[in-house]
Image: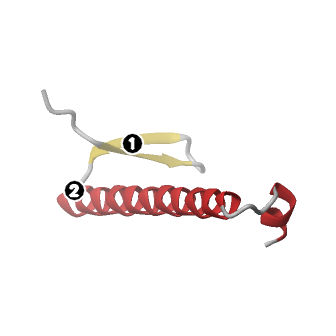
């Protein structure tokens, strides 16, 4: 079952609400934005993982939590 994506347009002057299906270009833009958001999220997760790994390595070298926090 495929869901039809719709654009909802609200005219504040008249209070009229119009719904229409998204165009192929709008759907492509939406998919591109979703892919970019997922890439940013993965990048942030990788950065956080790398930071935690670096902090663990510093702690393994004998640095205290205060010394690691000062870096």
* Disc 2 to disc 1, C-alpha distance: 15 Å
Q: What residue is shown with label 1?
A: 18
From the top left corner, tell me how far across and down residue 57 is, in percent: 61, 62
Q: Is residue 19 above or below residue 37?
A: above
- First in sequence: mark 2 vs mark 1: 1
The residue closer to the viewer here, 13 or 57, is: 57
Q: Quadrant of the C terminus?
A: bottom right
Residue shown at the point (84%, 69%) measured from the top left: 70
From the top left corner, tell me how far across and down residue 50 is, in percent: 53, 62
Picture quarter containing residue 66? bottom right
Picture quarter containing residue 68? bottom right
Q: Is residue 4 above or below residue 59?
A: above
Residue shown at the point (47%, 60%) measured from the top left: 46
In this picture, residue 6 sits left or right of residue 47: left
Mark 2 residue element:
loop
For this orientation, the residue located farthest to the left is 1
Q: Is residue 11 above or below residue 46?
A: above
Picture quarter containing residue 29? bottom left
For this orientation, the residue located farthest to the bottom is 71
Residue shown at the point (26%, 51%) measured from the top left: 22
Residue shown at the point (37%, 61%) measured from the top left: 33
The residue closer to the viewer here, 16 or 4, is: 4
Q: What residue is shown with label 2?
A: 23
Which numbered circle lies on residue 62?
Answer: none
Judged by depth in the image, the label closer to the viewer, 2 or 1, is 2
Mark 1 residue element:
strand
Judging from the image, the colouring scheme is: secondary structure
In this picture, residue 57 sits left or right of residue 26: right
From the top left corner, tell me how far across and down residue 67 is, in percent: 84, 65
Q: Quadrant of the N terminus?
A: top left
């Amino acid at each position: 079952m495929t869901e039809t994506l719709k654009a909802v347009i609200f005219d504040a002057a008249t209070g009229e609400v119009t719904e229409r299906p998204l165009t192929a270009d709008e759907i492509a833009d939406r998919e591109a934005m979703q892919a970019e958001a997922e890439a940013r999220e993965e990048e942030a997760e990788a950065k956080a993982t790398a930071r935690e790994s670096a902090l663990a390595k510093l702690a393994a070298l004998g640095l205290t939590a205060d010394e690691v926090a000062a870096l």
